[in-house]
């Protein structure tokens, strides 16, 4: 069974693209590495326990599922399976997890709908156990309806801090504090010009946070994280907007400094049509991602089947993408000045345990030298959590050797670590006719 | 640790730990007070970081499956799990 189209990611954009492709009588295989479809935003409970969801989110998920059911004869969703790569002949490798084996397909098009990676800037001590992304906390909440830690601090910048804060409150474990490095509440007029759906969502989060009296520090940032090995507690040192230093004790610290497209594995000369959709194309949020997925499906169907493009998808996409840009501007101050004045011993690359001192010692490196000599962006996360910071750091050095448009992100396959046993046990479907 | 009779359990370094049906290895370990999943050869502590299968920081060894992301792998009855650091780097995981 060689599908017409392979969609990577069973989240908002991937499933929306799949339903639109299937509506145009194309056979679609959707793969996702998680145990259930939903992606990060609509991650489903695996234990039967969950946190209350906002009505508009429930409605979106039902809408997406409804479309999938309507065209289910043309759609296969395969979870616990992941994208390993696509080669220049257009052969796509998908690894099935447990038992490990893989399959080769040659579809007519590939849709990359792998969402976002969280951006987390390095901080002194961020490599300690107990320090996670804010997304990891949300993932636990959505899968189990609760969190294991009794005391959680959320820090960094972005609307996700408010969303996760409100979700923690609803699960019965309000965060100890929310430490936001920008000043989102200084942009009142911009905030009020957002579409109603966003106002409603933001308002409900704020309402919960204010009602639960969770301390919210804006213009504050973490200076140091220290884990006490005897009691597993983290000591977090925070500089407030007035410049004073405060110290907090917590079990878990969730960090989040924005989102970045998770678009690994798209090679320059693929043998097939490749289309990114949703956050993996450009960070656009949940509402726009649905329209981007539908639009991507519609555009691919037009190319392959000469069907008519549904223009309403693009119009809605533009509206909500624009709204998302406004939200980014509300939080933008944090993204503009990243603190490069870190201690030399601060770990920059977690995977390879490389410090700022290691980066400085490279002395005007080219990006190739940063990778091969410095080992930055070469670890098993493939640079998802250091490449962006390292590039920004090199750009801040006026005499840097970094060329315009050059990127630390590698796009060769495999796009993630893959076991040899999966490569040995391979089913080749590339010659199968549909 | 919090292992009670009748509850499903899995093993972490030969210690039985209870889990709730549908829980990932990462969440079950954390709930049992284990937030440190071992140390990589370069000194990085293995633990939950991204929670969604992107960072590889929570990899553990699962008997019969090899190196697996603890956040993506659901616990199963009698599953044997252990830190990757307690094995040689070329071992595939079947002990």
Image: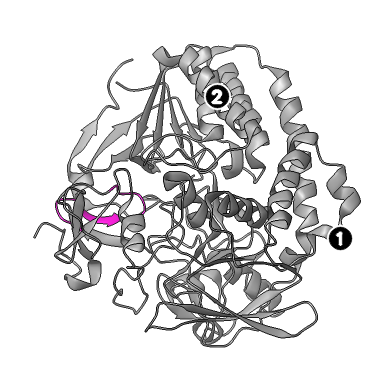
Residue positioned 17% across, 40% down in the render: A425
Magenta stretch: residue A246 in it? no
Local secondary structure at mark 2? helix
Q: Position of residue A391 (x, y in %)?
A: 61, 68
| Quadrant of the image containing the N terminus of chain A | top left
Q: Position of residue A247 (x, y in %)?
A: 62, 82
Q: Residues within 10 Å of mark 1 (few under 14, many from 20)?
A: few
Alpha carbon of mark 2 to alpha carbon of mark 1: how far?
A: 36 Å
- Label total for image: 2
Magenta highlight range: B62-74
| Marker disc for residue A186 | 1
To which residue does mark 2 refer?
Answer: A62
Q: Quadrant of residue A321?
A: top right
Is circle 2 on the same chain as circle 1? yes
Q: Chain of mark 2?
A: A
Circles 2, 1 touching at the beta carbon (< 8 Å): no
Local secondary structure at mark 1? helix
Q: Chain of mark 1?
A: A
Front-most of A56 and A261?
Answer: A56
């Amino acid at each position: 069974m060689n599908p017409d189209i392979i969609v990577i990611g069973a989240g908002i954009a991937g499933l929306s693209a799949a339903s639109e492709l299937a509506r145009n009588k194309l056979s679609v295989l959707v793969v996702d590495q998680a145990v259930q479809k939903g992606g990060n935003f609509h991650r489903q409970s695996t234990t039967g326990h969950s946190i209350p969801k906002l009505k508009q989110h429930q409605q979106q998920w039902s809408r997406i599922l409804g479309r999938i059911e309507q065209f289910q004869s043309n759609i296969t969703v395969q979870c616990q399976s992941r994208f390993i790569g696509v080669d220049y002949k257009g052969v796509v490798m998908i690894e099935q997890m447990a038992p490990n084996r893989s399959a080769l397909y040659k579809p007519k098009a590939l849709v990359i709908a792998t969402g976002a990676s969280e951006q987390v800037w390095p901080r002194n001590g961020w490599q300690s156990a107990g320090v996670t992304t804010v997304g990891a906390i949300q993932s636990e909440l959505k899968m189990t309806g609760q969190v294991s830690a009794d005391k959680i601090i959320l820090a960094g910048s972005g609307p996700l801090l408010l969303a996760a804060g409100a979700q923690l409150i609803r699960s019965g474990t309000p965060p100890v504090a929310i430490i936001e490095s920008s000043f989102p509440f200084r942009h009142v007029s911009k905030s009020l010009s957002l579409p109603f759906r966003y106002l409603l969502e933001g308002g409900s989060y704020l309402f919960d946070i204010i009602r639960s009296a969770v301390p919210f520090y804006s213009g504050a940032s973490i200076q140091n994280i220290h884990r006490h090995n005897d009691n597993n507690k983290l000591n977090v040192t925070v500089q407030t907007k007035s410049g004073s230093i405060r110290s907090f004790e917590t079990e878990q610290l969730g960090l989040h400094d924005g989102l970045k497209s998770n678009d690994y594995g798209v090679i320059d000369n693929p043998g097939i049509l490749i289309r990114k959709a949703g956050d993996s194309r450009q960070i656009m949020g949940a509402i726009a991602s649905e329209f981007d997925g539908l639009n991507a499906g519609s555009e691919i169907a037009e190319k392959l089947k000469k069907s008519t493009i549904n223009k309403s998808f693009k119009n809605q996409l533009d509206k909500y993408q624009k709204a998302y840009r406004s939200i980014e501007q509300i939080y933008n101050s944090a993204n503009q000045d990243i603190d490069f004045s870190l201690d030399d011993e601060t770990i920059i690359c977690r995977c390879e345990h490389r410090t700022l001192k290691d980066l400085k010692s490279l002395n005007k490196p080219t990006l190739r030298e940063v990778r091969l000599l410095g080992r930055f962006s070469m670890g098993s996360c493939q640079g998802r959590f250091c490449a962006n910071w390292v590039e920004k750091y090199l750009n801040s050095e006026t005499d840097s050797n970094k060329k315009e448009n050059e990127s630390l992100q590698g796009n060769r396959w495999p796009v993630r670590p893959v076991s040899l046993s999966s490569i040995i046990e391979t089913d080749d479907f590339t010659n199968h006719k549909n | 640790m919090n292992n009670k009779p009748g509850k499903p359990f899995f093993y972490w370094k030969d210690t039985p730990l209870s889990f709730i049906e549908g829980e990932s290895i990462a969440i079950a370990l954390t709930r049992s007070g284990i937030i440190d999943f071992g140390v990589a050869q370069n000194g990085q502590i293995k633990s939950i970081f991204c929670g969604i299968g992107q960072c590889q920081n929570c990899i553990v060894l699962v008997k019969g499956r090899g190196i697996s992301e603890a956040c993506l792998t659901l616990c199963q009855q009698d599953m044997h799990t252990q830190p990757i650091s307690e094995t040689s780097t070329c071992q595939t995981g079947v002990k």
